[in-house]
Amino acid sequence: MAIRKGSGKRCARLFRRTNDGIDMTARIIDGKRIAAELRARVADEAGRARRDHGLTPGLAVVLVGDDPASQVYVRSKHRLTQEAGMASFEHVLPADVAQDELLALIARLNRDPLVHGILVQLPLPKSLNTEAVINAIDPAKDVDGLHPNNAGRLANGFAALSPCTPLGCIILTKSVHASLQGMNAIVIGRSNLVGRPLLQLLLNENATVTIAHSRSRELATLCARADLVYAAVGKAEMVRSDWIKPGATVIDVGINRLVDADGKARLVGDVDFAEVSQVAGAITPVPGGVGPMTVACLLVNTLRAASAIAGLPKPAV
């Protein structure tokens, strides 16, 4: 199997060599490139806000504890926020921080006029009440889109700050399909972070949506009817080729670490990429698909929040 990269295009093409030559199969949706393009647009809009209105969007990230993966993720957010011309504020607290101390920090950030977006890195230590922490964030600054006010507005079809990963999934899908209207979609996974908000965003695009989960019956049959498949269950390579309707677009949200027989670790998604890419019309890789879009959409939400708080029109991004 070989991947041929397009010149300056968002999607590469995956080819399968056969005895008769080369058969074209799935388009590879280049999340890295699409995310880079999105970040560049955010930087342009942030620069315009700064020049025309004296507004510098500011993002505050709160990290509790010293989890190495979270530290890497927070550093990436800090770097990309600054590269987009925004202000970045980091707050690192010990794992044994008291609930009241964390809530007091959030209250200060809510009042800070330089901060337009607040993100508390999840998961939090078990000693902390995650729901109370999320509820304490000003909904206008809730760039993770998890506050009940934003979740409720999204569920009712109103404008709201949406969770970053589902928003990225929609942008990736629309890089393949200009319109999702009337398409049959299935979301595998019903988490508050991905599955449920993704359902609402797809409904807003006028797709027909099925949401599936661990207790869904005949899951493979449900998937095989879908034009759009979103896998977000956290189970390595669960979705196989016989689950996929030929030509369907597959968005793989999962990130799972597998260790091969030789001891080497590799990242895989919730979709068996090697199999499904022979059937799908387009597919996201892992890594390099949904992951880069999450941070890019965090910057989008910060820009939108800053504009709304300042009473400016919604930015063109």
Image (cartoon, grey):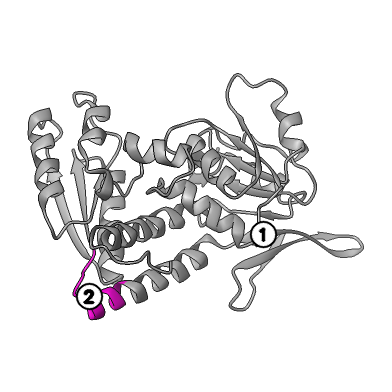
Question: Residue 84 location in percent, x, y?
Answer: 31, 70
Secondary structure beneath dot 2 equals: helix
Left or right of 188? Residue 77 is left
Left or right of 188? Residue 287 is left
Using the image, determine if residue 25 lies above or below residue 279.
below
Quadrant of res 310: bottom left
> Principal SS element in the magenta part?
helix
Question: Residue 237 location in percent, x, y?
Answer: 61, 37
| Residue, disc 1 | 177
**Does residue 146 appear anywhere in the picture?**
no
Extent of the magenta region:
46-57
Viewer-proximal residue among 142 and 214? 142
> What quarter of the picture does the C terminus occupy?
bottom left
Which residue is rendered at x = 14% and y = 42% of the image? 106
Question: Residue 30 location in percent, x, y?
Answer: 56, 63
Quadrant of res 215: top right
Using the image, determine if residue 248 lies above or below residue 30.
above
Which amino acid type is marked by label 1? Answer: His
Which amino acid type is marked by label 2? Answer: His
Which residue is rendered at x = 11% and y = 54% of the image? 112
| Residue, disc 2 | 53
- Mark pair 2, 1: CA separation: 35 Å
Which residue is rendered at x = 20% and y = 36% of the image? 136
Q: Which mark is residue 102?
A: none
